[in-house]
């Protein structure tokens, strides 16, 4: 199993550009989530999904959209990038909401 | 605001010593998890303790949970240089996990 994969590993955007961060898992996990981590900080929950077709907002959802058309994929879309979105983004999945979360390697995003 | 707050923010110990870090939280939880993050890397799950459990062990790790005090502690015994990392607690509430700001542990050889 590949576990949780994220692409790209690193991305530079200009203010106002849009992009999609990809996340996929091959463990048939129902629960998936996106976090951002800023320097010296913990992770903050952006959006999460409890299954295909079901998504909900976390702590810091503004400026981000998600969708969950399949169990495997959970892409995160930045609608109009801003410098405040410069961060490291982590995707995670778990069998259900009360089990161990498995994290992807992260995507480093720099918005100029 | 952060749900979980780790204490201390930073800890430096000698190899072979024990390291203890604490996590406090504000609201009721379903479970609490501890993660390790090496510099510039993703998070690795260490241990999960459910709200009806008081203590769990995994190798050199010992986690306690006191729901009356809304706090948890992580003890790493006989620390090694390879334990140098940041450690985070994450509290599970319904469908969300809220992470603390972490404890940076440095183990000196």
Image (cartoon, coloured by chain):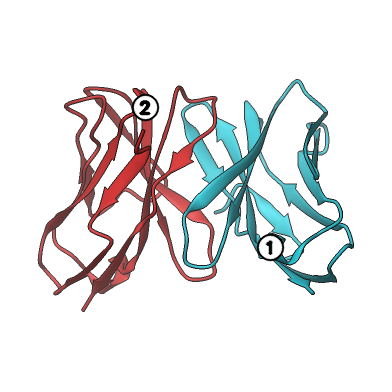
Residue A36 percent location from the top left of the image: 39, 56
Would residue A12 be found to the left or right of residue B21 on screen? left
Query: Are callouts 1 and 2 both on one chain?
Result: no
Callout 2 crowding tier (Cα within 10 Å): few <14, some 14–19, many ≥20: some
Q: In the picture, residue B50 is in which quadrant?
A: top right
Would residue A8 be found to the left or right of residue B46 on screen? left
Residue visible at 80% across and 45% down in the picture: B60
Would residue A40 be found to the left or right of residue B109 on screen? left
> Do we see residue B80 in this rendering?
yes
Q: Is mark 1 on a helix, strand or loop?
A: helix
Residues B47 and B1: in front is B47
Residues B16 and B37: in front is B16
Q: Which chain carries label 2?
A: A
Report which residue position mark 2 lands on: A27
Residue B98 percent location from the top left of the image: 54, 43
- From the image, which quarter does the N terminus of chain B lie in? bottom right
Q: Which chain carries label 1?
A: B
Callout 1 crowding tier (Cα within 10 Å): few <14, some 14–19, many ≥20: few
- Label 1 and label 2: CA atoms lie apart by 28 Å
Residue B12, above or below B99: below
Residue visible at 61% across and 38% down in the picture: B91
Q: In the picture, residue B32 is in which quadrant?
A: top right
Q: In the picture, residue B45 is in which quadrant?
A: top right
Report which residue position mark 1 lands on: B82
Q: Is mark 2 on a helix, strand or loop?
A: loop
- From the image, which quarter does the C terminus of chain B lie in? bottom right
Residue visible at 46% across and 22% down in the picture: A96
Marks 2 and 1: in contact by CB < 8 Å? Answer: no
> Do we see residue B29 in this rendering?
no
Which residue, as the protein is rendered here, is positioned at the far bottom? A112
Residue A36, above or below A27: below
Q: Colour of chain A?
A: red
């Amino acid at each position: 199993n590949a576990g949780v994969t994220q692409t790209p590993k690193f991305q530079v955007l200009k203010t106002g550009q849009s992009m999609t961060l990809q996340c996929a898992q091959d463990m048939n996990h129902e629960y998936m989530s996106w976090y951002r981590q800023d320097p010296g900080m913990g992770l903050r929950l952006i959006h999460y999904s409890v299954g295909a077709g079901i998504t909900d907002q976390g702590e810091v959802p503004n400026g981000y959209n998600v969708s969950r058309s399949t169990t495997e994929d959970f892409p995160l879309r930045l609608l109009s990038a801003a410098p405040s979105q410069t961060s490291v983004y982590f995707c995670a999945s778990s069998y259900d909401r009360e089990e161990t979360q498995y994290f992807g390697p992260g995507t480093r995003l720099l918005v100029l | 605001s952060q749900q979980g707050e780790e204490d201390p923010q930073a800890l430096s110990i000698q190899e072979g010593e024990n390291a203890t870090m604490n996590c406090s939280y504000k609201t009721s939880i379903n479970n609490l998890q501890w993660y390790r993050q090496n510099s510039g890397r993703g998070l690795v799950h260490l241990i999960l303790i459910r709200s009806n459990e008081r203590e769990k062990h995994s190798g050199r790790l010992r986690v306690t949970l006191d729901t009356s005090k809304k706090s948890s502690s992580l003890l790493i015994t006989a620390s090694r240089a390879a334990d140098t990392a940041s450690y985070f607690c994450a509290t599970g509430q319904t469908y969300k996990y809220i992470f603390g700001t972490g404890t940076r542990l440095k183990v000196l050889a």
